[in-house]
Image: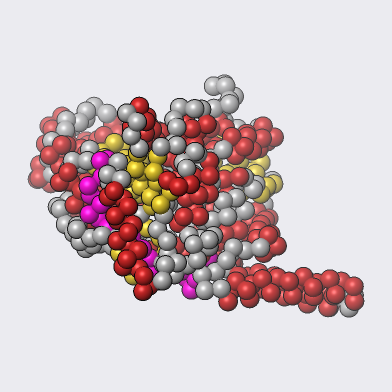
């Protein structure tokens, strides 16, 4: 039954593991090895985005372990910003060079990236030559794609023709919003781009499609189970049977086999978790309270085997009791223990578990907030202007000529760099000084929240994974893991809280959780602290899946709001808003 509904082969992997990346990398390496053995080249078309960074890390590790030789691999990209100089730090080619190509042995002459600096009068000739070059090499062996929130393939928007060749496109709102984290402000983002046509892509030998995070649930369901439509370009790939889809649990939740498995397969109703999931889903889908669900509704939605063994009255009371047992206040939380709250950014703790954080302190726990990244990418330039303005005027207030001279020079230097950035048509990377000021701003806000919550202590980390110079982070390294282990060894927590909402736009939460889980592997079974995952800003637990619901009264809710409002640089219009439209 699953095969009848799902029009692509789909593999589903744990949210927290690296198995998805390992499998995709294995498929790529296997193709390269087979072609090398046959003295053939491999044409690989690469993807950008947070979802593929772990794949590139695995490819690098396999290369370093001498498991694969890329010297006969030919690399293309399938999109590029148009109008930008080829050496601009925010181009797709620069991203690919930094995260992968500089670390493996692909020959320079075997790299064919789209050039967004070509004059428009020469563009038609250039794109024809690009397509001809790809065709002369025998086409694509492996095409790597990451699913966009709206179903884009690179810069190809919905309704792109299947027979399209490489072409110039106008970037739509979805693509522009996606680009904000790299360019820092929308005014710097190019309005046009070059996109490889679908004709070459559909004919690839293998197409490997990756989707991660619960912001991809709707689009994954449409791609895998929906009708073929040019409105959703990936559905056009079904005809050649060459496409394989790799998703994590979060992205897969709306596939029928995950959301309502009883429609397509036998379900073990002896498992209480399955009974709870089915009843919660039916209640949510129908918009009816659990206690008011009727026999006809269970029958209508293929749950006859469930109510055959579990009468509706007993079943609904059981599910309500299970949910009620998960609802706790102070009494259901740890007391008098050493607690670490890991927060990927300086505001995730107060936004996503602020009520719990305040209750943990009230329960007499020794709570330490550990901020895993400095958050410098998410600060507007005008916040930097305010910072240096205040420093200068503070010095003037005390009428110290030497201090004023020093602060004036600092003010002039910072303002000069910000003006140069503002004058640049596509923006530029922040200077080290500006990045440092942005870090101080985020740290001051995080420290203010910690003092407000009266926690025992806090630390700000600056791990290698955050030092990519772009919104998309570096792959996880051993140094990142060792840094987390150092924190655990220092504080010796009995309970640890970590962010479990893995769908933040740039993949930071996912990397941070993976670093924590890797560090936890160093513990013996007897030493390992209790680990809880919290969610809130980007992703929420379904009632059937959550282990605890922590209540807040009106006063506690206001306290949480007050703590959140300490993060003024993120208020009203966050620098990296994603597509949700939520402030917090």
Q: Front-most of 334 and 501?
A: 501
Residue 147, percent across and down? Answer: 32, 51
Which residue is at a point 48% across and 47% down the rendered structure image?
Answer: 108
Q: Is residue 388 above or below residue 256?
A: below
Instruction: Name the quadrant containing residue 195.
Output: bottom left
Residue 96 visible in the shown view: yes
Instruction: Name the quadrant containing residue 55.
Output: top left
Q: Front-most of 504 and 99?
A: 99
In the rendered picture of this protein, how many numbered marks are placed on residues? Answer: 0
Quadrant (top left/top right/bottom left/bottom right) for the N terminus: top left
Residue 12, percent across and down? Answer: 31, 37
Which residue is at a point 67% across and 32% down the rendered structure image?
Answer: 489
Q: Is residue 490 above or below residue 436?
A: above
Tell me: 154 left or right of 486: left
Which residue is at a point 32% across and 66% down the rendered structure image?
Answer: 125
Residue 288 visible in the shown view: no
Residue 142, percent across and down? Answer: 31, 41
Tell me: 149 left or right of 346: left
Tell me: 96 left or right of 564: left
Magenta stretch holds residue 198: yes
Q: Front-most of 174 and 60?
A: 60
Q: Front-most of 40 and 223?
A: 40
Magenta stretch holds residue 305: no
Q: Which residues are magenta?
A: 184-208
Q: Is residue 562 above or below residue 367?
A: below
Residue 397, percent across and down? Answer: 83, 78
Which residue is at a point 54% across and 69% down the rendered structure image?
Answer: 427
Q: What's the coloring here?
A: secondary structure
């Amino acid at each position: 039954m699953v095969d009848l509904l799902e029009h692509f082969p789909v593999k589903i992997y744990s949210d927290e593991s690296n198995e998805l990346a390992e499998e995709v990398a294995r498929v790529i390496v296997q193709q390269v090895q087979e072609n090398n053995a046959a003295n053939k080249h491999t044409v690989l078309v690469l993807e950008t985005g947070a979802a593929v960074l772990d794949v590139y890390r695995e490819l690098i590790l396999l290369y370093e372990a001498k498991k694969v030789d890329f010297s006969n691999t030919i690399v293309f990209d399938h999109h590029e910003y148009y109008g930008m100089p080829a050496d601009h730090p925010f181009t797709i080619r620069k991203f690919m060079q930094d995260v992968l190509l500089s670390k493996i042995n692909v020959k320079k002459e075997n790299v064919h990236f789209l050039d967004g600096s070509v004059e428009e009068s020469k563009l038609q000739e250039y794109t024809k030559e690009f397509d001809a070059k790809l065709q002369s090499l025998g086409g694509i062996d492996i095409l790597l794609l990451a699913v966009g929130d709206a179903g884009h393939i690179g810069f190809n928007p919905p309704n792109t023709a299947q027979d399209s060749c490489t072409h110039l496109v106008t970037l739509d709102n979805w693509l522009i919003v996606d680009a904000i984290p790299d360019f820092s402000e929308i005014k710097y983002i190019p309005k046009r781009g070059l996109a490889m046509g679908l004709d070459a892509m559909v004919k690839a030998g293998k197409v490997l499609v990756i989707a991660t995070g619960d912001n991809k649930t709707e689009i994954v369901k449409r791609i895998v189970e929906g009708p073929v439509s040019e409105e959703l370009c990936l559905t056009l790939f079904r005809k050649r049977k060459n496409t394989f889809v790799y998703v994590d649990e979060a992205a897969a939740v709306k596939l029928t086999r995950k959301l309502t498995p009883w429609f397509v397969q036998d379900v073990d109703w002896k498992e209480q978790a399955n009974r709870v999931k089915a009843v919660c889903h039916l209640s949510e889908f129908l918009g009816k309270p659990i206690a008011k669900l009727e026999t006809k509704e269970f029958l209508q939605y293929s749950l006859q085997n469930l109510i055959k063994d579990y009468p509706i009255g007993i079943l609904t009371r059981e599910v309500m009791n299970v949910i009620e047992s998960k609802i706790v206040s102070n009494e259901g939380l740890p007391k008098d223990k050493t607690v670490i709250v890991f927060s990927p950014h300086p505001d995730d703790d107060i936004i996503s578990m602020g009520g719990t954080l305040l209750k943990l302190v009230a329960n007499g726990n020794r709570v330490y907030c550990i901020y895993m990244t400095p958050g410098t990418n998410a600060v507007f330039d005008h916040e930097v202007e305010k910072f240096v303005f205040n420093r200068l005027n503070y010095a003037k207030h005390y009428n110290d000529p030497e201090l004023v001279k020093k602060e004036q020079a600092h003010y002039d230097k910072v303002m000069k760099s910000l003006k140069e950035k503002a004058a640049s048509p596509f923006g530029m990377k922040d200077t080290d000084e500006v990045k440092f000021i942005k870090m101080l701003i985020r740290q001051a806000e995080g420290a203010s929240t910690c003092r407000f919550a009266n926690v025992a202590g806090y630390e700000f980390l600056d791990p290698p994974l955050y030092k990519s110079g772009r919104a998309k982070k570096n792959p996880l390294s051993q140094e990142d893991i060792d840094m987390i282990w150092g924190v655990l060894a220092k504080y010796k927590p009995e309970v640890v809280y970590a962010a479990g909402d893995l769908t933040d736009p740039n993949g930071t939460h996912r990397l941070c959780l993976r670093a924590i889980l890797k560090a936890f592997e160093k513990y013996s079974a007897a030493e390992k602290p209790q680990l809880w995952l919290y969610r809130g800003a980007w992703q929420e637990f379904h009632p059937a899946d959550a282990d605890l619901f922590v209540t807040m009264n009106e006063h506690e809710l206001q306290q949480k709001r007050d703590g959140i409002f300490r993060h003024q640089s993120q208020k009203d219009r966050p620098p990296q808003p994603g597509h949700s439209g939520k402030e917090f």
